[in-house]
């Protein structure tokens, strides 16, 4: 069997969730959209269900997958509904929906169904993606609160630059939100992972941690707080071939690596079709049988190559860690490869996931 695997540490996931909730000081929706950032939404939700106050996904398809797997906790649809025809399903499966566009408010006003729906009304506090402006938000709050088909209204907004600790934008957005909700009854929800880790003075009744659940730091720098995150995914495979090449000889597509001296090349069963970044540069760190090593040559679809010259004990069958563990954090690897820590696990496919 091909040795590429993603080991998923569910204890670490639970520990990160508890940290997020502790930092938020209230209730926390575990964000498991995009198949739990590539970690497997059903398995992650099952592992968290005893602890979690609820879950958040992007859309109804993802929520129904969790319901079909027996998840009974509340589930919020972060993108809301795309067509009014989803509303009966949302009610039937007891889902919560974000509402961030005027047409969605109208659709709810027109909806008639057996069960009432909980709405998370979204304010555009400055990200300018989804959400209503202050006046429309306050009007929609009044309108929705009066509807019998609306079970309750939670007030939410989303932060655009909470990962930039030197930007004033987060405080500006928080102030806009505070102004918009003044005098309105109901719970609030503001914080994502970077806000929980970087902005202790921005808080809300509900927090919505995503990336930090998976043990990755969304901030540029590590801190005592981010050191408490435990990595959840460990991407690994094995050396499947080895060879010596002479000085001046290239490795792989495009001869991106040319040996400056006699070099022992190890071929690892892991490529960009597995989610490893295709443009990881020469020198990108890997861990070979527990020892630090480096990538050489361009990453292929199914394979990549590492330098075994200084790993005399390593050879065919040696373990290679691509990320995870304590040694190779997503947050350090991602910027070297020109991607974000969010993208790396989200891109994982084809590799076998093993849960522990
Ligand atoms: C994805 C998402 C989150 C989680 O963000 P992280 O940065 O991964 O913590 C929170 N809220 C909304 C609206 C989202 O779309």
Image (tube, grey):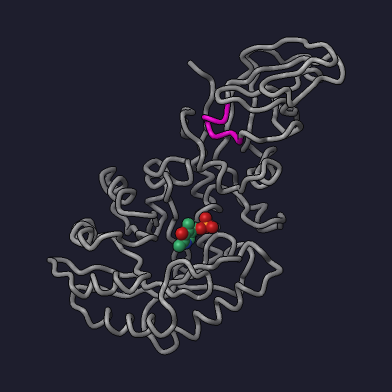
Estimate the x, y position of residue 298 in percent, counting from the top left: 67, 27
Estimate the x, y position of residue 347 in percent, counting from the top left: 51, 39
Q: Nearer the viewer, residue 188 or 279?
A: 279
As drawn, which residue projects farthest toward the bottom?
Answer: 183
Does 88 appear above or below 100? above
Magenta extent: 271-277
Using residue 142 as the reference point, say whether residue 212 is left or right of it: right
As drawn, which residue projects farthest toward the front?
Answer: 254
Q: How many marks?
A: 0
Image quadrant assignment for residue 247: top right
Question: Residue at the spot x=75%, y=30% of the render?
Answer: 292
**Residue 273 falls within the magenta-colored stretch:** yes
Residue 245 visible somewhere in the drawing: yes
Does 270 appear above or below 217? above
Residue 18 visible somewhere in the drawing: no
Using residue 283 as the reference point, say whether residue 50 is left or right of it: left
Q: Nearer the viewer, residue 80 or 237?
A: 80
Estimate the x, y position of residue 175 in percent, counting from the top left: 55, 82
Does 165 appear above or below 260? below
Question: Residue at the spot x=32%, y=56% of the render?
Answer: 73
Estimate the x, y position of residue 6 in percent, counting from the top left: 52, 32
**Residue 184 falls within the magenta-colored stretch:** no
């Amino acid at each position: 069997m091909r040795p590429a695997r993603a080991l998923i540490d569910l204890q670490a996931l639970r520990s990160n969730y508890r940290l997020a909730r502790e930092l938020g000081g209230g209730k926390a929706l575990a964000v498991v959209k995009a198949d739990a950032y590539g970690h497997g939404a059903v398995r992650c939700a099952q592992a968290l269900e005893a602890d979690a106050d609820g879950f958040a996904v992007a859309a109804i398809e993802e929520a129904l997958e969790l319901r079909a797997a027996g998840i009974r906790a509340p589930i919020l649809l972060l993108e809301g509904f795309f067509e009014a025809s989803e509303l009966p399903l949302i009610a039937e499966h007891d889902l919560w929906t974000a509402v961030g566009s005027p047409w969605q408010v109208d659709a709810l006003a027109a909806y008639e169904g057996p069960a009432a729906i909980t709405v998370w009304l979204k304010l555009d506090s400055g990200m300018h993606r989804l959400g209503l402006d202050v006046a429309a938000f306050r009007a929609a709050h009044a309108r929705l609160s009066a509807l019998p088909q609306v079970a309750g209204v939670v007030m939410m907004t989303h932060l655009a630059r909470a990962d930039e600790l030197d930007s004033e934008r987060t405080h500006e957005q928080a102030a806009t939100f505070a102004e918009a909700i003044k005098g309105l009854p109901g719970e609030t929800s503001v914080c994502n992972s970077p806000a929980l880790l970087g902005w202790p003075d921005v808080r809300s009744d509900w927090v919505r941690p995503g990336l930090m659940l998976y043990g990755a730091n969304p901030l540029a720098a590590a801190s005592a707080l981010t050191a408490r995150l435990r990595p959840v995914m460990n991407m690994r495979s094995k050396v499947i071939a080895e060879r010596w090449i002479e000085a001046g000889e290239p490795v792989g597509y495009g001869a991106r690596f040319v040996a400056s001296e006699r070099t022992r090349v190890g071929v690892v069963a892991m490529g960009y079709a597995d989610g490893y970044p295709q443009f990881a540069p020469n020198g990108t760190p890997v861990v070979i049988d527990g020892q630090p090593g480096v990538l050489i040559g361009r990453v292929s679809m199914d394979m990549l190559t590492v330098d075994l010259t200084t790993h005399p004990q390593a050879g065919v069958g040696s373990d290679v860690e691509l990320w995870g563990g304590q040694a190779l954090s997503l947050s350090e690897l991602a910027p070297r490869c020109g991607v974000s820590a969010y993208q790396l696990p989200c891109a994982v496919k084809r590799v076998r996931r093993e849960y522990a």
